[in-house]
Amino acid sequence: MSPQSLDLRPAPGLMDTLAEQPLDPMLMVLHLLRNDPRPDKIDLGIGVYRDDSGHTPILQSVKAAERHLIETQTSKDYLSPEGDAAFVAALAPIVFGTEPDDTAWGMQTPGGTGALRLAAALLHRTNPDCRVWIGTPGYVNHAMLMQAASLEVIEHPFFDKPTQTLLFDAMMSALNEVRRGDAIVLQSGCHNPTGVEFSHDQWQVLAQFLNDRGVVPVLDMAYQGLGSGLDDDAWGLRHVLTQVPEALVCVSGSKNFGLYRDRAGALWVQGSNPNSVRRARTNLNLMARTLWSMPPDHGAAVVRIILTTPQLNALWRSELDVMRERLTGLRHDLATAVPEFETVKRQSGMFSLLPLDRDQVTRLRIEHGIYMVESGRINIAGLNQGNLPVFASALRSVL
Ligand SMILES: Cc1ncc(COP(=O)(O)O)c(C=O)c1O
């Protein structure tokens, strides 16, 4: 081989083989928002609670628990892949309304996302052919988390954006295709992104169906207390658990404790008997070990202190009431200001999916400095008494 024919260019590296990935739509909104110099821009994108001044506060109950934690914590030794068992025990009655019996067992996870990821891993381990049904439109990460565990995802209708209607009949007819051993992801209360909720009757029909057809519910509750109250928001979840032998319950403390970055969450398994739950526990321990080894402690410790200290528990509940009432009030105000969107006041929680198309969302951003997810999802908590009239008049101008 002559020296001229030698290819001296460096061989492509491993990273060169990667396909460029699109920016997450949420991060795209954030990027555009941060680069918008307009001082009166309105952020209805990111899904975090905001107070009337647009700030995401640290709850007073959290601050007090953190102070207590710093004064009393004597070690940062490892806990275990199961995390803080006392946190899980303190959270259980909030989630289930009662103490779970020996056919249910829970562990701490890094946020609700960790719980969902571990639930997906368990589903795959128990049945690699399990298909996971997810309503559309839904929380974008649900499908990605299930697929990350090599599970097949099948979408079913859930909500019609133009008419703002929950498509229960269409959903049930699509679900007719389920196979025994499939799973379904269901949000209990404060649906992200639509804010709609099954009626009690619909939960009953659905729970019966899941039991009859042997479908495992993955119940995701990320906004408990921010819709209609701690018990009401958990009604569907609790009802389903009474009707089916096996279920997975994923809970997030990110929103209702305002602990977003501290990653406090939990996963419970409900099994048909104590032995199957014990087996699930050993498998979950092993899988958590290879996913994150141990969950971060701080957020869960804070929740444990709040829930086990009567004064802080009461303070937290009153802070949650304030957040919920603020969201409900804003929904009413928006529906009054823009009667075309009166359905917003019948929805609950942090989000609504407004019947806007992509052009209208773009015009709101460019002409009015109003930021929301491209789908038309708004974070109700991003509104306040100052910007709500501005938002309402901008909405009217693009309708
Ligand atoms: C429906 C739903 N489930 C789960 C999560 C995950 O919550 P976390 O931040 O605790 O991981 C979110 C977060 O936005 C969510 O909206």
Image (cartoon, rainbow, N blue to C red):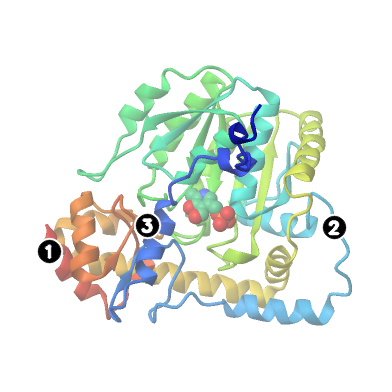
First in residue order: circle 2 vs circle 3: 2
User: Residue 351 shows which numbered tag?
Assistant: 3
Q: Secondary structure at mark 1?
A: helix
The quadrant of the rendering that contains the C terminus is bottom left
The residue carrying pointer 1 sits among few (fewer than 14), some (14 to 19) or many (20 or more) residues within 10 Å by Cα, namely few
- Identity, as a three-letter code, of the amino acid under mark 1: Arg
- What is the x, y in percent for residue 331? 29, 64
Question: What residue did someone put label 1 on?
Answer: 396
Give the CA distance from mark 2 to mark 1.
54 Å
User: CA gap, disc 2 to disc 3?
Assistant: 36 Å
| Amino acid type shown at disc 3 | Phe
Q: Nearer the viewer, residue 353 or 336?
A: 353
Depth check, mark 1 against mark 3: the one in front is 1
Residue receiving disc 2: 79
Indicate whether 112 appears above or below 384. Answer: above
- Name the residue located 31 percent from the left edge and 69 percent from the top edge: 330
Q: Is residue 120 visible?
A: yes
Residue 98, position as x, y percentages in the image: 66, 50
Position of the N terminus, as image quadrant, is top right
Residue 355 is at least partly visible in this image: no
Quadrant in which residue 150 is drawn: top right
| Residue drawn at 41 percent across, 30 percent down | 155
The amino acid type found where label 2 is placed reads Leu
